[in-house]
Amino acid sequence: MDPKSLSVEDPRATYPFIPYKDWVFLPTPAIRTKGPEKHFQDIQDYETRETDIILCSSQKSGTHWVHEIMSMLMKQTTEYNSLGPWWELNLEYLRQPEEVKNITGPRIFSTHLPYSFLPRKHLDNGYKLVYLNRNLKDRYVSLYNFFQGKLGVPKWTWAEFFDDFILEDNLYTGWFNYTKEMTAATKNKSNKIFSVMYEDLLIDPKKHITDLANFLEVPYTDEFIDDIVIKCSFKNLKDNKLNVCSIIDTDKKSTLFRKGIIGD
């Protein structure tokens, strides 16, 4: 497939990807406007606060799910947040630091970028990170289905997707590189990183949400955790959560929450 033949001017388009070094990235408005090198440098130079938390995850690993859980814990409410991690403080979409400097209290940033791309101040000062990952096979099946019908995305067959994504493994520097970097970072005891697998959170949500609350140093009761477990169940999120991803779907379909199972 020739990306040049599939160029889409609509800023909501998710394809063609933007090449940078040996990798490719989603064409977010910030990357299109500034260029990948400038935007990624701005991210590394961004000065986060000690109270900021960055949610790090590979694509289709449950980012919106965990962001919702974190938002409820930090805001001490079981009300769903207004948008989610895509528009609200997502590093890939953040054009200028001034856009979010007036947000008071702890801010939850999110990103699919690997550890080496993250704000240096955040890493050097040992500020908090939440690292979420998922079984590779399930992640790729979910990603394949997610891209179907998105603006600018060609109608890949599974064979084409396998060749372009799984064998190339260069989207956001690739899952293997991403996982290698994040795993190494979690082994450094000076880093404040909460690590959780999608599958573990799905099997025993109360335990891992409680552990996350302790990591975030927020007050909680058993009843509060139980309420979050219920509100953040896959069915409730799919039925009640605003799905911002529908605006990049050619048919305006809700494609963010699909099955939410192990063994997709």
Image (cartoon, rainbow, N blue to C red):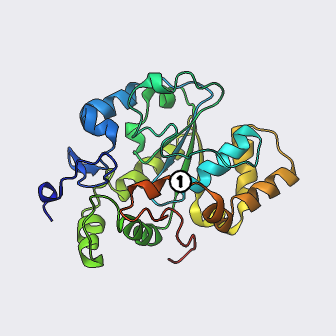
**Could you tell me which quadrant the N terminus lies in?**
bottom left
Image height check: is 261 above or below 87? Answer: below
Badge 1 crowding class, 10 Å Cα cut-off, few under 14, some 14 to 19, many 20 or more, is many
Relative to 192, 27 lies left or right? left
Q: Nearer the viewer, residue 230 or 184?
A: 230
Residue at 26%, 67% in the rendered image: 167
Relative to 65, 78 lies left or right? right
Image height check: is 1 above or below 76? Answer: below
Q: Nearer the viewer, residue 94 or 128?
A: 94
Asked which secondary structure carries label 1, the reply is helix
Residue at 31%, 45% in the rendered image: 11
Which percent across, then down, holds residue 197? 57, 60
Q: Quadrant of residue 192?
A: top right
Q: Amino acid at mark 1?
A: Thr
Residue tagged 1: 63
Which percent across, then down, holds residue 261? 58, 73
Residue at the front extreme?
A: 251
Q: Quadrant of residue 104?
A: top right
